[in-house]
Image: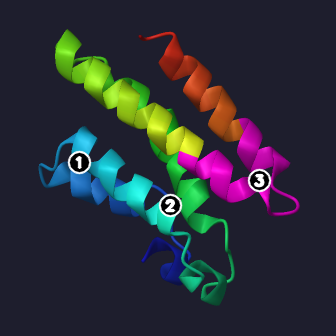
Amino acid sequence: MSCKLQADKSMVYRTILNIGVSIEQVLDIYIKLVSVNERVWLGCGDETHVCGVAARLLQAARADLAPLPPAPRRRALARCKDLHEAALSALQARPNTQELIDKLTVAQAHLDRMD
């Protein structure tokens, strides 16, 4: 939706979080979206859109995970790693994605320090 509207990449996942869906469930949704690797994003003009959203989600996850108790935080951090790996895997075969790969890697490095 944010791709079609050319809106901020955080619009959809922020809305989902704001209605009360847990961060773990949102991460699971985006892992599936990235893993399916649909070409629907190409129709919106940005085939790396969902990976860009994943990078934003990982960047924002630090604030969302910090107040969680240790066990749920560890589970969510594991899901963050899964999302990071799925996005990197989806981007490896595409040209001109190094900047996005770097954003994903920096976001994950910050999350790794929370572990």
Of pointers 2 and 1, the one earlier in the residue sequence: 1
| Nearer to us: label 1 or label 3 | 3
| Number of other residues with Cα within 10 Å of mark 2, as a class: few under 14, some 14 to 19, many 20 or more | some
Mark 2 sits on what residue? 35
Give, as a three-letter code, the residue at label 1: Gln
Relative to 33, say whether 112 is above or below: above
User: Residue 79: horizontal and vertical position, in percent?
Assistant: 37, 36
User: Residue 14: horizontal and vertical position, in percent?
Assistant: 32, 52
Residue at x-position 60% and y-position 66%: 49
Residue 92 tag number: 3
Q: Is residue 64 magenta?
A: no
Relative to 12, say whether 113 is above or below: above
Q: Please give left or right for residue 92 compared with residue 66 in the image.
A: right
**Residue 61 falls in which quadrant of the image?**
top left
Task: State whether residue 8 appears in this view.
Answer: no
Q: Which residues are magenta?
A: 86-102
Q: Please give left or right for residue 46 compared with residue 80 in the image.
A: right
Q: Please give left or right for residue 7 compared with residue 24 in the image.
A: right
Give, as a three-letter code, the residue at label 3: Gln
Overall secondary structure of the magenta section: helix
Quadrant where the C terminus is found in the figure: top left
Element type where label 3 sits in the image: helix
Q: Please give left or right for residue 113 compared with residue 26 in the image.
A: right
Give, as a three-letter code, the residue at label 2: Ser
| Number of other residues with Cα within 10 Å of mark 1, as a class: few under 14, some 14 to 19, many 20 or more | some
Relative to 89, say whether 71 is above or below: above
Marks 2/1: CA distance?
Answer: 15 Å
Residue 25 tag number: 1
Marks 3/2: CA distance?
Answer: 13 Å
Element type where label 2 sits in the image: helix
| Nearer to us: label 2 or label 1 | 2
